[in-house]
Protein backbone atom coordinates (compact mmCIF):
# COMPACT_ATOMS: atom_id res chain seq x y z
CA UNK A 1 0.00 0.00 0.00
CA UNK A 2 1.32 3.42 -0.90
CA UNK A 3 0.63 6.59 1.04
CA UNK A 4 0.78 9.97 -0.64
CA UNK A 5 1.12 13.26 1.13
CA UNK A 6 3.03 15.37 -1.35
CA UNK A 7 2.97 16.43 -4.97
CA UNK A 8 -0.17 16.43 -7.03
CA UNK A 9 -2.14 14.50 -4.49
CA UNK A 10 -1.86 16.90 -1.58
CA UNK A 11 -5.14 17.64 0.10
CA UNK A 12 -4.57 21.40 0.06
CA UNK A 13 -4.95 21.72 -3.66
CA UNK A 14 -8.00 19.50 -3.72
CA UNK A 15 -10.31 21.37 -1.40
CA UNK A 16 -13.53 21.93 -3.20
CA UNK A 17 -14.79 25.46 -2.62
CA UNK A 18 -15.51 25.84 1.08
CA UNK A 19 -15.35 22.18 1.99
CA UNK A 20 -12.64 21.79 4.60
CA UNK A 21 -11.94 18.17 5.47
CA UNK A 22 -10.53 18.95 8.91
CA UNK A 23 -13.54 21.02 9.93
CA UNK A 24 -16.01 18.54 8.48
CA UNK A 25 -14.31 15.59 10.17
CA UNK A 26 -14.35 17.42 13.51
CA UNK A 27 -18.06 18.09 13.14
CA UNK A 28 -18.60 14.46 12.19
CA UNK A 29 -16.68 13.18 15.25
CA UNK A 30 -18.74 15.44 17.53
CA UNK A 31 -21.89 14.17 15.91
CA UNK A 32 -20.84 10.56 16.34
CA UNK A 33 -20.11 11.13 20.02
CA UNK A 34 -23.64 12.42 20.52
CA UNK A 35 -25.27 9.27 19.13
CA UNK A 36 -26.27 6.44 21.43
CA UNK A 37 -27.06 3.53 19.12
CA UNK A 38 -25.33 1.75 16.26
CA UNK A 39 -28.15 2.14 13.73
CA UNK A 40 -27.82 5.91 13.97
CA UNK A 41 -24.03 5.69 13.92
CA UNK A 42 -24.14 3.61 10.72
CA UNK A 43 -26.55 6.04 9.06
CA UNK A 44 -24.39 8.97 10.08
CA UNK A 45 -21.18 7.38 8.80
CA UNK A 46 -22.79 6.59 5.45
CA UNK A 47 -24.12 10.09 5.17
CA UNK A 48 -20.72 11.62 5.94
CA UNK A 49 -18.97 9.35 3.45
CA UNK A 50 -21.38 10.45 0.71
CA UNK A 51 -20.89 14.10 1.64
CA UNK A 52 -17.12 13.73 1.32
CA UNK A 53 -17.53 11.85 -1.95
CA UNK A 54 -19.69 14.64 -3.33
CA UNK A 55 -17.05 17.21 -2.54
CA UNK A 56 -13.73 15.55 -3.29
CA UNK A 57 -12.21 16.14 -6.72
CA UNK A 58 -11.36 12.49 -6.82
CA UNK A 59 -10.21 12.34 -10.43
CA UNK A 60 -7.38 14.68 -9.52
CA UNK A 61 -5.96 11.79 -7.55
CA UNK A 62 -4.09 9.27 -9.62
CA UNK A 63 -3.99 5.55 -9.02
CA UNK A 64 -0.43 4.55 -8.38
CA UNK A 65 1.81 2.93 -10.93
CA UNK A 66 2.65 0.21 -8.47
CA UNK A 67 0.66 -2.96 -8.05
CA UNK A 68 -0.95 -1.83 -4.82
CA UNK A 69 -3.84 0.51 -4.11
CA UNK A 70 -3.12 4.01 -2.95
CA UNK A 71 -4.52 5.68 0.13
CA UNK A 72 -4.71 9.46 0.31
CA UNK A 73 -5.49 10.91 3.72
CA UNK A 74 -8.00 13.75 3.54
CA UNK A 75 -8.08 14.36 7.29
CA UNK A 76 -7.12 12.70 10.56
CA UNK A 77 -8.60 13.66 13.92
CA UNK A 78 -6.90 13.58 17.32
CA UNK A 79 -9.52 11.08 18.51
CA UNK A 80 -8.23 8.58 15.94
CA UNK A 81 -10.87 9.04 13.26
CA UNK A 82 -9.55 9.33 9.73
CA UNK A 83 -11.04 9.84 6.30
CA UNK A 84 -9.26 8.97 3.09
CA UNK A 85 -9.70 8.55 -0.61
CA UNK A 86 -8.39 5.28 -1.95
CA UNK A 87 -7.44 5.03 -5.62
CA UNK A 88 -7.60 1.61 -7.18
CA UNK A 89 -6.48 -0.01 -10.39
CA UNK A 90 -7.61 -3.25 -11.91
CA UNK A 91 -6.25 -6.21 -9.99
CA UNK A 92 -5.43 -4.30 -6.81
CA UNK A 93 -6.29 -6.59 -3.93
CA UNK A 94 -6.13 -5.95 -0.22
CA UNK A 95 -4.98 -8.53 2.25
CA UNK A 96 -7.73 -10.10 4.31
CA UNK A 97 -7.91 -7.65 7.17
CA UNK A 98 -9.96 -6.42 10.11
CA UNK A 99 -10.88 -2.92 11.18
CA UNK A 100 -11.21 -0.75 14.26
CA UNK A 101 -14.53 -0.47 16.06
CA UNK A 102 -16.23 1.60 13.37
CA UNK A 103 -15.64 1.75 9.65
CA UNK A 104 -17.41 2.93 6.54
CA UNK A 105 -16.58 2.84 2.84
CA UNK A 106 -18.33 4.33 -0.13
CA UNK A 107 -17.50 3.42 -3.70
CA UNK A 108 -17.44 6.59 -5.76
CA UNK A 109 -16.61 4.79 -8.97
CA UNK A 110 -15.56 1.35 -10.17
CA UNK A 111 -16.38 -2.32 -9.83
CA UNK A 112 -15.09 -4.44 -6.98
CA UNK A 113 -15.26 -7.89 -5.47
CA UNK A 114 -15.95 -7.68 -1.75
CA UNK A 115 -15.34 -10.82 0.30
CA UNK A 116 -16.66 -10.72 3.86
CA UNK A 117 -15.40 -13.13 6.49
CA UNK A 118 -16.48 -14.10 9.95
CA UNK A 119 -14.13 -14.81 12.80
CA UNK A 120 -14.62 -18.24 14.34
CA UNK A 121 -14.10 -19.27 17.93
CA UNK A 122 -10.77 -20.88 17.06
CA UNK A 123 -9.58 -17.53 15.63
CA UNK A 124 -9.70 -18.85 12.09
CA UNK A 125 -11.92 -17.16 9.54
CA UNK A 126 -14.66 -18.40 7.24
CA UNK A 127 -15.90 -16.77 4.06
CA UNK A 128 -19.39 -15.47 4.71
CA UNK A 129 -20.12 -14.07 1.29
CA UNK A 130 -18.50 -12.74 -1.85
CA UNK A 131 -20.36 -10.00 -3.69
CA UNK A 132 -19.87 -7.62 -6.58
CA UNK A 133 -20.13 -4.01 -5.51
CA UNK A 134 -19.55 -0.72 -7.23
CA UNK A 135 -20.44 2.87 -7.84
CA UNK A 136 -22.71 4.24 -5.11
CA UNK A 137 -22.54 1.22 -2.80
CA UNK A 138 -21.85 2.04 0.84
CA UNK A 139 -20.93 -0.21 3.75
CA UNK A 140 -20.61 0.65 7.42
CA UNK A 141 -20.14 -1.39 10.55
CA UNK A 142 -19.94 -0.92 14.29
CA UNK A 143 -18.04 -3.66 16.08
CA UNK A 144 -16.10 -4.14 19.27
CA UNK A 145 -13.88 -1.41 20.75
CA UNK A 146 -10.16 -1.85 21.42
CA UNK A 147 -9.69 -4.54 18.79
CA UNK A 148 -9.09 -4.73 15.05
CA UNK A 149 -10.91 -7.98 14.45
CA UNK A 150 -14.07 -6.20 13.25
CA UNK A 151 -15.57 -6.34 9.77
CA UNK A 152 -13.00 -8.69 8.24
CA UNK A 153 -12.88 -8.39 4.47
CA UNK A 154 -10.84 -8.44 1.28
CA UNK A 155 -11.41 -6.04 -1.59
CA UNK A 156 -10.36 -6.57 -5.21
CA UNK A 157 -10.69 -3.91 -7.90
CA UNK A 158 -12.22 -5.35 -11.07
CA UNK A 159 -12.49 -2.19 -13.18
CA UNK A 160 -9.67 -0.29 -14.87
CA UNK A 161 -9.85 2.37 -12.15
CA UNK A 162 -11.75 2.77 -8.92
CA UNK A 163 -12.19 5.31 -6.14
CA UNK A 164 -13.57 4.94 -2.64
CA UNK A 165 -14.01 7.08 0.44
CA UNK A 166 -12.95 5.21 3.58
CA UNK A 167 -13.65 6.31 7.14
CA UNK A 168 -12.26 4.62 10.24
CA UNK A 169 -12.55 5.29 13.95
CA UNK A 170 -8.84 4.58 14.39
CA UNK A 171 -5.68 4.07 12.38
CA UNK A 172 -6.68 1.50 9.77
CA UNK A 173 -3.07 0.55 9.12
CA UNK A 174 -3.04 -1.26 12.46
CA UNK A 175 -5.67 -3.71 11.20
CA UNK A 176 -5.14 -7.39 11.84
CA UNK A 177 -4.37 -9.53 8.78
CA UNK A 178 -5.58 -13.07 8.28
CA UNK A 179 -4.59 -16.13 6.30
CA UNK A 180 -7.26 -18.11 4.59
CA UNK A 181 -7.08 -21.19 2.44
CA UNK A 182 -10.00 -20.47 0.15
FE1 LIG B 1 -10.77 -2.67 4.75
Image (cartoon, rainbow, N blue to C red):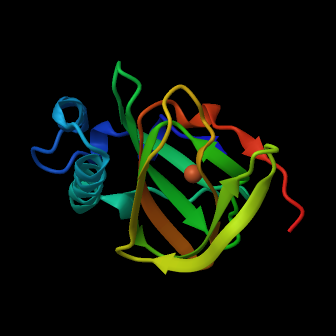
Residue 75 falls in image quadrant? top left
Q: Residue at x 54, y 72 (%)?
A: 161
> Which residue is at the far front?
121
Q: Residue at x 24, y 32 (%)?
A: 29
**13 horizontally vs 117: left or right:** left
**182 horizontally vs 50: left or right:** right
Q: Position of residue 167 (x, y in %)?
A: 40, 45
Q: Position of residue 163 (x, y in %)?
A: 45, 64
**Of residues 25 and 31, the one drawn nearer to the viewer in this rendering:** 31
Q: Quick check: 47 above or below 11?
A: below
Q: Position of residue 142 (x, y in %)?
A: 42, 45
**Of residues 62 and 79, the one drawn nearer to the viewer in this rendering:** 79
- In this orientation, does residue 106 appear? no
> How many discs mark residues in the rendered view?
0
Q: Position of residue 15 (x, y in %)?
A: 23, 45
Q: Residue at x 60, y 35 (%)?
A: 148
- In this orientation, does residue 168 appear? yes
Q: Quick check: 162 above or below 169?
A: below
Q: Quick check: 151 above or below 175?
A: below
Q: Quick check: 117 above or below 135?
A: above
> Which residue is at the far left?
18
**Of residues 43 and 93, the one drawn nearer to the viewer in this rendering:** 43
> Which residue is at the far top?
78
Q: Residue at x 44, y 46 (%)?
A: 103
**149 horizontally vs 120: left or right:** left
Q: Quadrant of the C terminus?
A: bottom right
**Of residues 115 and 52, the one drawn nearer to the viewer in this rendering:** 115
Amino acid sequence: MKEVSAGKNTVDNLHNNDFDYDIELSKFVSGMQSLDNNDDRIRYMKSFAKTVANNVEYKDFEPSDCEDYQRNYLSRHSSGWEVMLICWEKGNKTKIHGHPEMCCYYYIEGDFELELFKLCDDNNIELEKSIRVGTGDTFADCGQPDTYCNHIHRVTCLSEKGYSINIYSDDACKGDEYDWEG
